[in-house]
Image (cartoon, grey):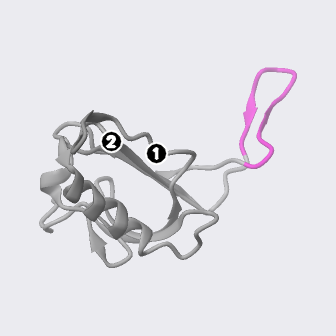
């Protein structure tokens, strides 16, 4: 059972639980990866699972004022270990294993910023994919 004050910490920055839109936090831990798996002529699957698993974490932020969103984005960006890759080290709660784990993640593609007005953002979605 999660007992911490956060679900995900990016480097040294804890993303406040109060900033995560209720019902949008999704953690897909320990996703299995296969290498050259195939189906034979009789229809049997031959898997070659790899030992390294990957996690994906995604969520939306609540409606935030400009200064609050800047806190989140700057908190993440200040912890990039590679700007080009948008690479970060994350400490996150794994629901399947019921504990906190650390991994190297990247923020994929683009982050879309939805503005309600000049100083307010809504439904900014963040995703972290483990290497």
Closer to the camera, 51 or 27? 27
- In the drawing, what numbered circle is on residue 38? none
Instruction: Identify the secondary structure beneath mark 1.
Output: loop
Q: Which SS type dominates the magenta stretch?
A: loop
- In the drawing, what numbered circle is on residue 124? 2
- Residue 114, horizontal then vertical, whole percent: 34, 35
- Residue 62, horizontal then vertical, whole percent: 19, 42
Q: Is residue 98 left or right of residue 104?
A: left
- Residue 72, horizontal then vertical, whole percent: 29, 61
- In the drawing, what numbered circle is on residue 111? 1
Q: Dot 1 surroundings within 10 Å: few (below 14), some, or many (20 or more)?
A: few
Contact, CB < 8 Å: mark 2 with mark 1?
yes
- Residue 3, horizontal then vertical, whole percent: 12, 66
Locate the N terminus and report the quarter of the image it occupies: bottom left
Image point (33%, 41%), residue name? 124
Image point (55%, 63%), residue name? 86
Q: Is residue 5 above or below residue 32?
A: below
């Amino acid at each position: 059972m999660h007992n911490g004050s956060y679900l995900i910490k990016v480097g040294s920055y804890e993303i406040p639980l109060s900033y995560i839109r209720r019902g949008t936090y999704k953690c897909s831990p320990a996703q299995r990866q296969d290498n050259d798996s195939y189906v034979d002529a009789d229809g049997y699957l031959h898997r070659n699972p790899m030992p390294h698993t990957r996690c994906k974490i995604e969520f939306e932020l609540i409606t935030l004022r400009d200064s609050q969103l800047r806190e989140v984005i700057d908190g993440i960006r200040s912890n990039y270990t590679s700007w080009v890759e948008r690479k970060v080290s994350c400490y996150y709660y794994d629901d399947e294993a019921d504990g906190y784990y650390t991994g190297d993640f990247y923020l994929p593609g683009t982050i879309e910023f939805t503005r309600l007005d000049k100083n307010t953002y809504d439904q900014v979605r963040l995703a972290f994919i483990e290497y």
